[in-house]
Image (tube, rainbow, N blue to C red):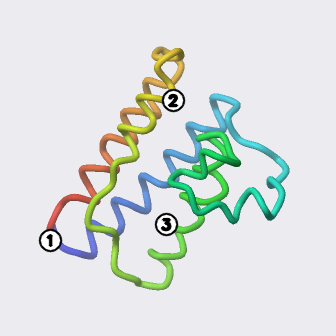
Amino acid sequence: MTVEQRVLDIADHLMLIEREMQVQGWWDDEAPRDEALESTVPFAVDTLSFEQWMQWIFLPRMKIIIELGHPLPSASGILVMAETVFADRPEQSRELRRLLAVFDQLIAAKA
């Protein structure tokens, strides 16, 4: 897979992740307080739900990386976190977890 194709595939997956979050009702119309978004704790677990972190931090940062042509992360462990968060909602979160698994694989892939 070329670098360009990998970037396109990741961008497509980010859109699919966003759509699935909206379908499941895990998409907020209003942003959290600025202080909540400034957390330095992994996944902002001290100030945001996982779904909020994905919507307001993860997805926007990944989109900026792609749009500006910055180097992609070399690894992602987002699926592990999602599996923990959604342990009590396995059926509802199945598609989102599948999409996150593919995202993790795409990030780990080397061109």
What label sits on residue 111 in the rendered view? 1
Query: In the picture, residue 27 is in which quadrant?
Result: top right
Task: Give the spatial CA distance, label 3 vs label 2.
Answer: 21 Å
What label sits on residue 85 in the rendered view? 2
Which residue does the image show at 39% across and 40% down from the upper left?
99
What label sits on residue 19 in the rendered view? none
Of residues 81 and 111, the one drawn nearer to the viewer in this rendering = 81
- CA neighbours of label 1 inside 10 A, class few (<14), some (14 to 19), many (20+): few
Q: Earlier in the sequence, mark 3 or mark 2?
A: 3
In the rendered image, the quadrant that contains the C terminus is bottom left
Q: Earlier in the sequence, mark 3 or mark 1?
A: 3
Task: Give the spatial CA distance, label 3 vs label 1.
Answer: 18 Å
Helix, strand or loop under label 2: helix
Helix, strand or loop under label 3: helix
Is residue 53 shown left or right of residue 29?
left
Residue 12 lies, with reference to residue 67, above or below; the image says: above
In the rendered image, the quadrant that contains the N terminus is bottom left
Is residue 86 shown left or right of residue 28?
left
Task: Give the spatial CA distance, label 2 vs label 1.
Answer: 31 Å
Q: Nearer the viewer, mark 3 or mark 1?
A: 3
Query: In the picture, residue 109 is in which quadrant?
Result: bottom left
What label sits on residue 62 in the rendered view? 3
Residue 42 lies, with reference to residue 25, above or below; the image says: below
Mark 2 residue type: Val
Cβ atoms at labels 2 and 1 below 8 Å apart: no
- CA neighbours of label 3 inside 10 A, class few (<14), some (14 to 19), many (20+): some
Query: In the picture, residue 76 is in which quadrant?
Result: bottom left
Q: Earlier in the sequence, mark 2 or mark 1?
A: 2
The image position of residue 72, as x and y in percent, is: 34, 72
